[in-house]
Image (cartoon, rainbow, N blue to C red):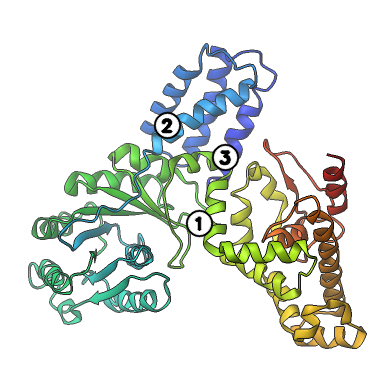
Amino acid sequence: MFEALSQRITDTFRNLAGRGRISQDNVREAMDEVRTALLEADVHLQVVTQFCEEVAQDAVGRAVTKSLKPSEEMIAIVHQRLVQLMGPVDSHIMLVEPPPTVLMLCGLQGAGKTTTCAKLAAYLKKSGRSVMVAAVDLQRPAAVEQLAVLTSEVERDAPGAGSIHFYAEPDKCAEYGRVTGVAVGVSRRALAEARRLKVDALILDTAGRLHINDELMAELGAINAALRPQQIFLVVDAMVGQDAVNSARVFHERLAIDGIILCKFDSDTRGGAALSVKQVTGAPIKFVGIGEKFDQLQEFHPQRMAGRILGMGDVVSLVEKVREEVSEQEATHIAQRMAEGRLTMDDFLTQLGSVRRMGPMKQLLGLLPGAGSALKNIEVDEKQLDRLEGIVHSMTAGERRDVKTLNKSRVKRIARGSGTTPADVNKLTRQFQMMQKMTRQMASAGVGGPLKSIGELSRTDSTRMPGVQNMPTLRAGGSTRTVSVKQRYKQRKKK
């Protein structure tokens, strides 16, 4: 998300290039464009007005640092104000003693609370905590069954030394709406069971409700009064826009929410909710959901998000993804094999798998500085990556160790087995042999790394990886150019 907003703001500040100083006139002109961009991104009017006024006050008359251009100075000012608008950093979950810590999730219907419950349980399990997830949504049909399935999948598949427990009373769904206080009773008994099992945290999945429905909002207040949860999280759909702000305000007035979780953050949306809900409620954004998988709930960092909005990328998040998927031992092993010129197709397959587990290629590229405008020229076909894996898997163990053993008949057999063409197989082997040669040459200069082969295959000109079209070298400011592997090596050698 934020692509459109990022592009508009970047273009606006680029127009300041060549100005000797930041004057009142060019600040007003720039902020008019920023104001329009923020409103089009569905940021709340009150937030936009206050933000633009604060940036203008910071910028007018400010001397441009000698090492910076006026546009860069304005970006620095806006970055600082964006961090203040979305901050501070407060993504930790406070756990109390004695346990359990009660976490209550609330929000509008369809906001994504049930899925977020499972993601939050996986997040706590990864840190070694024991968690109980309680189905308190008795209003929506099959909500209890959905949460039961998700919880069992988290217990089975999510990494971590913690444990997951599930509590539900499906028979109470029939009583809901006819008997007062059914959801409160289920919540009380879930807390008692959590205490008996001595779990670290109890997560309550409450029913979705419209903020204008006083009866349903009163039920949330009753659960809050009965259990006194340590933290109340409001789950907000990032695609909702202005209504997300209005509902967040009402929920906060009724429950005094402690934090916000933004769902569907990976969707093609304008992103205004992320810039508005914190300012309107005063509650910090704790997490953002960037996908449907259990590990795709990320801690929210205002400084990193501000960098993405301004086209600065998010290298820290990229490094964290690499650390999660590539162990130090594996990195050392691959680096040593690269230095010795002994990389095999099995090594390539391992690295490709590590990169793909980090997320979609285009999403990863978006974390690189200056990638905002460049991504328009990049088309990544994930199915082509599947074909690459199919080609390697269709090779024998000996062929993967040494691709030079491939002859015409073997290439045809591999192509039939992978559902590709002999030309595709030959293209991959040529790329791989060139990469092997380059790694041997670069090893003497100290250039290498566990993901180098993927980078070379995806960034070359004449040897571009199938499925990655017009892959540029990304530069700050959005300018791009394509450079071949051989040219880059010559440049490094000259240096």
Q: Residue 138's quadrant in the figure? A: bottom left
Quadrant holding the C terminus: top right
- Residue under label 2, please give it: 48
Q: Is residue 67 above or below residue 379?
A: above
Q: Nearer the viewer, residue 265 or 465?
A: 465
x, y (%) of residue 428? Answer: 81, 71
Q: Nearer the viewer, residue 199 or 20?
A: 199
- Residue under label 1, please give it: 267
On the question of residue 90 being in view, the answer is: yes
- Residue under label 3, please give it: 6
Q: Is residue 447 above or below residue 358?
A: above
Q: Is residue 24 above or below residue 128?
A: above
Of the residues under marks 3 and 1, which one precedes in the sequence?
3
x, y (%) of residue 294? Answer: 43, 67
Cβ atoms under marks 2 and 3 closer than 8 Å:
no
Alpha carbon distance from label 3 to label 1 = 15 Å
At mark 2, the secondary structure is helix
The answer to whether residue 271 is left or right of residue 63 is: left
At mark 1, the secondary structure is loop
